[in-house]
């Protein structure tokens, strides 16, 4: 009934490693499923949740929130079409990550899960780090992007990650003390990382 959270610098291979771990252990891999669960709970489309998630903590999202009139929100809710903003997203995120953690046998990718499940007795928290250049090359290879696009994606995701954690009052997300295991992907490959994680989980 273990829970494994994967935090990562974007492009360090966290999503790929998470899927590899889930496949080997026959665990659920929770990534986009989290978005779908939040969308269902808030009665909105997954695309809306994804949009709010991407902008969480940025100036744009705060500007949008100020522009949404209360009476408009009330009308939307009365029509049972649902509504979600940054605060509602974060509230649902905590609840749903906690629920997933309680079910166990799951690998959860990012979204502050290392904080939300910090006290979970069967959770293992893993952080992947890598050099900027390696992360750009990883994105180029695995997402078939030209270099300029890959660089833009890495920079944008680094900024989004920082904004999200600041929004939940956390800025120590790369601190080794938060994790059971920190993997420097500039020194090991994915297969080696997989063996290390499996050894840790299976020996418990």
Image (spheres, rainbow, N blue to C red):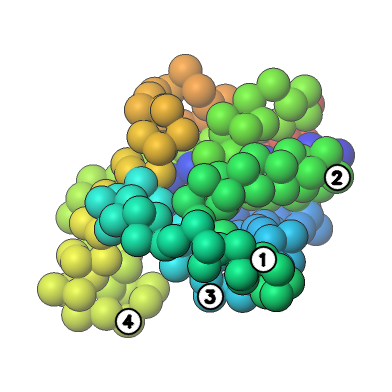
Which label's residue is closer to the chain start, 2 or 4?
2
Q: Residue 40 at what x, y percent from top left?
A: 73, 66
Horizontal side of residue 25 vs 45, given as left or right: right
Residue holding disc 3: 47
Horizontal side, residue 188 vs residue 6: left or right: left
Front residue (pair 70, 168): 70
Return the disc, 3 or 1, that comes first in the chain's sequence. Answer: 3
Q: CA distance from mark 3 to mark 1?
A: 18 Å
Q: Nearer the viewer, mark 2 or mark 3?
A: 3
Spatial CA distance of label 2 from label 4 is 35 Å
**Residue contact between numbered discs 3 and 1, judged by CB atoms under 8 Å:** no
The residue that disc 1 covers is: 77
Which type of secondary structure does the marked residue at label 1 adopt? helix
Outermost residue, front side: 71
In primary-sequence order, the first of circles 1 and 4 is 1
* Residue positioned 44% across, 61% down in the render: 69
Q: Nearer the viewer, residue 43 or 22?
A: 43
Q: Which residue reaches farthest top?
A: 177
Check disc 2 and report the residue beneath it. Answer: 103
Does 171 sit left or right of 101 as displayed?
left
Determine whether label 4 and label 3 are within 8 Å by CB: no
Can you identify the residue that label 4 sits on?
A: 144
Mark whose residue sits in front, 1 or 4: 1
Q: Report, in whole angstroms, how far the alpha carbon at label 2 lies from the one at label 1.
A: 30 Å
Rendered view: 2 above or below 58: above
Q: In which quarter of the view is residue 115 placed? A: top right
Q: Position of residue 7 (x, y in %)?
A: 49, 42
- Looking at the image, tell me whether mark 2 or mark 3 is earlier in sequence order: 3
């Amino acid at each position: 009934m273990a829970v494994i959270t994967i935090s990562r610098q974007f492009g360090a291979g966290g999503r790929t490693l998470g899927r590899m771990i889930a496949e080997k252990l026959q665990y659920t891999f929770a990534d986009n499923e989290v978005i779908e669960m939040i969308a269902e709970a808030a009665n909105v489309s997954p695309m809306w949740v994804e949009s709010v998630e991407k902008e969480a903590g940025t100036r744009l999202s705060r500007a949008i929130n100020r522009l949404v009139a209360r009476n408009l929100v009330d009308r939307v809710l009365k029509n049972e079409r649902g509504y979600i903003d940054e605060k509602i997203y974060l509230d649902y995120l905590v609840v749903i990550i906690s629920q997933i953690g309680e079910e166990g046998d799951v690998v959860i990718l990012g979204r502050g899960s290392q904080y939300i499940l910090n006290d979970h007795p069967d959770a293992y928290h893993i952080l992947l780090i890598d050099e900027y250049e390696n992360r750009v090359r990883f994105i180029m290879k695995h997402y078939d992007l030209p270099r300029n696009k890959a660089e833009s994606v890495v920079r944008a995701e680094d900024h989004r990650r920082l904004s999200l954690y600041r929004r939940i009052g956390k800025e120590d997300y790369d601190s080794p003390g938060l994790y059971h295991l920190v993997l420097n992907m500039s020194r090991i490959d994915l297969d080696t990382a997989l063996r290390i994680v499996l050894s840790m989980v299976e020996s418990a």
